[in-house]
Each structure stands twice: as structure tokens, then as C-alpha cells.
Amino acid sequence: MRNLQLIDLGLLTALDLLIETESVTMAAERLGRSVPAMSRTLARLRLAIGDPLLVRAGRGLVATPRALALKPRVAALVAEARAVLTPDSFSPARLDRRFTLRASEDLAAVLAPPLLERIAAQAPGVRLCLLPEGEEQSDALRDGRIDLDIGARGDDWAPEIVTRTVLHLPLVGFARPGHPRLPALTQMEVFAAAGHVAATRRGVAEGPIDRALAAHGLARQVLLTVPSATAALAVVARSDLVTAAPALLATQLSLDVAAFPLPVPTPPMTLAISWHPRVSADPAHSWLRGEVAAALADLAASASGQSAPR
């Protein structure tokens, strides 16, 4: 036990080279050390192991039987240590892993097909689990129940959560193609007076559109609230109600609705991906983040009739 404090990884590397070369000078050159420094290292090894290890034979040195017996074990230990301290080369094709993502029902419906296609082409061993948005926020990312959140970062999230904005989606108005007031819905008064269906998970219909109309003394007539934009668009397709949603949603779901410009300026919907910093350096997680961002960019580009930048 008295010699344990003398052992370190550097000593093992030096021992491996000393036994291999049977030369203090050559081992020093291989390690980039001076000959006196390597001689001191050999002295430490002799003390730690309790064996001379290299002994004089004519004008050179030869390994002792103890050193020769240690040679394969030391070489294996050094190789294993190097493997531990060398970053793994990452290959998606070798991944066998399940990732859990959290997204809204609307986003899951349009994102899942292209994302699965991208992942299947590169990493057939990867499985995805898409969970709906809930009341929980950053806790699920912190404890590992969620690998990646896709949406807008919550105001009450823990400060360590990493967020990367990937898209800004403009909102447009939607009505059924034969809506009796469709041409005039781009006028504020006509738009406000129309019957509206609002998408809200929490049943709170007021939002940026309402605040923009209120600045002009107008208010929407919200006759129905539903939990998702997909549901709102489905209602619009079969009624005279109107709604506002990102253009790519109706495009990707092939819903029979007509788009029109909103009569008031509204901020775009921000899409971001968020994760806990403990997985920031994980190459598999980094790859997943890139694939999600690329799939979202492809969706936005297809909705606008352009090719996504690579």
C-alpha cells in the first residue's frame, strides 16, 4: 500500500515505452522528455514495482523477467486508458437509442413524417417518442424524462436550459374556400366581426391579434376555442368561422382552407429547441438536434415554395 501514491497514468505510459525500447534515451525521445527526466521516472518505477526492470547488459539495457512478464498487461492498460481519454468517433448508423421529444399536437403532426424519414436514412436503430405538451416545463429536461423540447421556451424555465431558435413562422388567416366574406377578411372591421375559432391549450383566447385589434378599438368575436390549431383549421374547413395559424400547418396537412393576410401586424410564432446542458456535448444528442432543426427548416421552405438552405 505504501507505493500506491507513486502510480499514475504517466508512469504506466513511461513503463510501456521503457520495456518496449529497453532504452532510457529512446523512451525519452518518444515521450518528448529529457533523458535525465526519464531516468528519474525509471527510478520511481523501480521503487513502485520493487524490481530494477531494466539492467545493464554490455553497452545497453535489457528488461528483467519481471518487466517482460508485465509487458502485455502494461500495454493493455495503456491502450485502454488511451481509448477512455479519446473521444469516440460518432456514427449515426451505429446508434441504438430511444429519444423522447416534447412538442405540440400540431407540430408533432407535421414534423414526425419528415423527421422519421431523415433519421431512418441515417440511423435505423433510433426510435422516437413524441410526448404532448403538458404543465411541466424544464423539470422534465433536467431529470432526463425529455431529451428535447420543441416549441417556445417557457418563461419559468430554469436558467441553465439551453435554447436555440430555429424558425420564425408568420401567422396568416384561414377561412373555407367558399366563405361569403373571404375577399373582405383582409379589412380589420370585417375580420374582427367574423366568427372566430381560437386555438388554445388553456382556454385563454386573447393573444397578439386581439391586442393589435384593440389598438384600433376592435375585438374579435371568438365563438369557439379548441386545444390545437389543427382542430381550429378542421372547424374552419367546415364552417364560416375563421382562424389564424402558421401557413405551413395547413400546407403540410393538406386541409381544404384558403389563406389570407391578416389585417393587423402580429409577431411570428417562434419555434425553438431546448435541452439540458448535461447533454450538450453528447454527439448523438447533437446529431438529433441538427436533424430536428433541418426537418423544421425543410417544412418552412416547402410551405413557402423554396428549398431549405443546407
Image: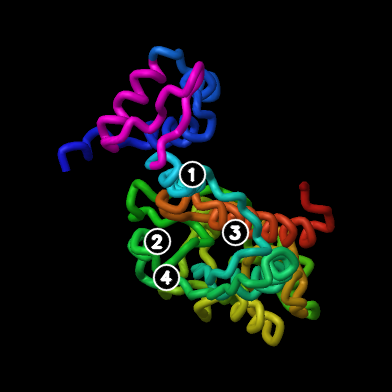
Give me the disc on residue 75.
Answer: 1
Query: So how many labels did they put on this image?
Result: 4
Q: Please, what is the three-letter code of the amino acid marked with disc 4?
A: Val
Of the two numbered discs 4 and 3 on the same chain, state the one appearing first in sequence.
Answer: 4
Residue 194 vertical position relative to residue 18 in the rendered view, above or below: below
Identify which residue, 210 or 61, lies in the foreground: 61
Q: Residue furthest left?
A: 2
- Mark 1: few, some, or many residues within 10 Å (few <14, many ≥20)? some
Marked residue nearer the N-terminal end (4 or 2): 2
Residue 61: say if magenta: yes
Residue at image mark 3: 288
Contact flag, marks 4 and 2 (Cβ < 8 Å): no
Q: CA distance from mark 4 to mark 3?
A: 33 Å
Amino acid of disc 3? Leu
218 or 85: nearer the viewer? 85
Q: Can you give x and y, in whole percent of width and height, for residue 259 in the image?
A: 75, 67
Q: Are marks 1 and 3 in contact (CB under 8 Å)?
A: no
Please report the bounds of the magenta region as a residue range.
Answer: 37-65
Q: Amino acid at mark 2?
A: Leu
Identify the mark nearer the N-term, 3 or 2: 2
Q: Which residue is mark 2?
A: 141
Above or below, comparing residue 52 to residue 114 in the picture: above
Question: Is 36 positioned to the left or the right of 249 in the image?
Answer: left
- Residue at screen point 54% across, 67% down: 220
Task: Report x, y in % for residue 265.
Answer: 62, 50
Judged by depth in the image, the label closer to the viewer, 4 or 1, is 1
